[in-house]
Image: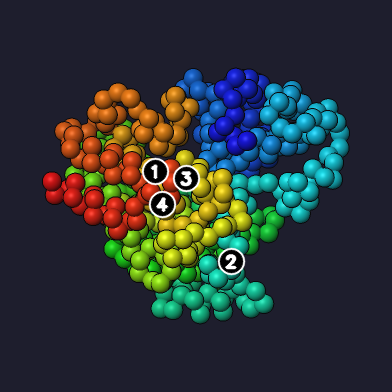
Amino acid sequence: MFIYDMPFLERKKLCSILDRNNCFEELAAVHMQFDSETVQKISREFFRGISPTEKLLDLWSHHNHTVFELFILLYRMKHYQAMTILKPLVDSKYHHLIKQSTCLPELMADLKLEQEPITSEKILNAPSCENNETKPQKPNGISLISCVTESVGAVPQIPYDDLRQSTNDWNTGSILGRGGFGTVFKGVWKCTQVAIKRIEKKADDNSDQIFQSYTELHCLNAYRHDNILPLYGYSIDGPQHCLVYQYMSGGSLEHRLHIRDASRVLSWPTRLTIAIGTARGLQFLHTIRDKPLIHGDIKSANILLDLNEIPRIGDFGLAREGPPQTDYVKVSRIHGTRPYLPDEFMKYKKFSTKVDTYSFGVVLFELATAGAAYSNKRVNKFLRDHVVFWEGDVLQLKDSRAEGGEDFFKGLVEVGKGCVRTGAKDRPEMVTVLLQLEAVMNQ
């Protein structure tokens, strides 16, 4: 059972228990390994009348964690009261762990924890394809430097000291965001504003983070397009590896859709233009070569806007070459963000271009409604289900902050519904989606 499938009553009881004495903080920081800034943000939910544990579970559930994993993390905390709440939701053979002092070897084997602990970084960044031919090869037996240099061609290698100076010695005031991979800084390099992703070294092995960055470097060098985030350079000669991108002053689409500043609310023509640009970039990835490149993590947070609201697709760390567009490949593990993923991928690990189509459909619903991709405040927690199964007037779902645009709104919803059909074969290819969106613009 995934976290997002946890019954309401058990989840409410668990949140109540972990909110006491701020037990959720140990769970988040020590066992789930969220960074301190994220834990602080979660803690502040209390002052908004929201359970911090509820917010924590929301964040953790987006990365496909299970109730069983949570049960084991609570075991490590020796929080037996909380474990009791989850007892009916896990296999009975593990019930004896409640108020037991040792963990059975078979449990470790089931979770594969003997050599590799559960961490958000491991699940977020781990490669997912069984067939090594479907992704850039992980360096093996040769140095990372020689492998990267051979792969990226004309992309310049930038001295680490140049990047350090461009961010005023990695000043915290230059931070644009954080993630499992590390930190993104804003800097000025060669008189140009840039965004610098610095891959943080972990106390344990961080080869997955490095490999994810290598994959992104490989993809951004091989696939150039107006709607794909431009890569300016990379750095591998310092204590941390870095990727340098064009700075996107418009921020992420996710941020812009939830912004409180009324003057920066996206208009309906702009929303449709963003949808068209993103679709154009995706169809390019899917069709430019014999085998499509599947992004694998399309979501509003990974669509960045420039000064003129032109969208660029970013974060290619989970991208993989796929099979011909009429087929799929079985992968060894699930990656991506749950509210944007279709059932055939979640349940059967079938990976195809139609995964990107489905994810893009959820983004279209975000553009239309400005609703969160996942929210516990709705009967249907997933935005996809909230829109598809809405029984009232569809215009009630429209983002009321943006005036007019009823036809654009309805167009985004209708095209989105086609993208999120349950069967992968029933979803259109992104070329068709692009044409459908252009027709909405021209109607």
Q: Residues within 10 Å of mark 4 (few under 14, many from 20)?
A: few
Mark number, residue 425: 4
- The kind of secondary structure element at disc 2 is loop
Image coords of residue 321 (percent x, y): 48, 65
Q: Nearer the viewer, mark 1 or mark 2?
A: 1
- Compare residues 243 and 424 and report the one nearer the observer: 424
Structural distance between the alpha carbons of marks 1 and 2? 27 Å
Amino acid of disc 3: Pro
> Few, some or many C-alpha atoms within 10 Å of disc 1 (few <14, some 14-19, many ≥20)?
some
Foreground: 357 or 171?
357
Q: Which residue is mark 2?
A: 131
First reached walking from the N terminus: tag 2 or tag 3: 2
Verify CB contact (< 8 Å) between mark 3 and mark 4: no
Badge 1 element? loop
Residue at x 50%, y 69% (from the top left corner): 235
Task: State how far apart marks 3 and 4 are (Cα).
Answer: 12 Å
- Residue 273 visible, this orientation: yes
The residue at the point 13 percent across, 46 percent down is 443
Could you tell me the amino acid type at mark 1? Answer: Arg
Q: Decide: marks 2, 3 in contact (CB < 8 A)?
A: no
Residue designated by label 3 = 342
Element at label 3 = loop
Q: CA distance from mark 2 to mark 3?
A: 21 Å
Circles 4 and 2: CB distance less than 8 Å?
A: no
The answer to which quarter of the image holds residue 431 is: bottom left
Real-space CA distance between mark 4 and mark 2, rounded to the nearest whole angstrom: 23 Å
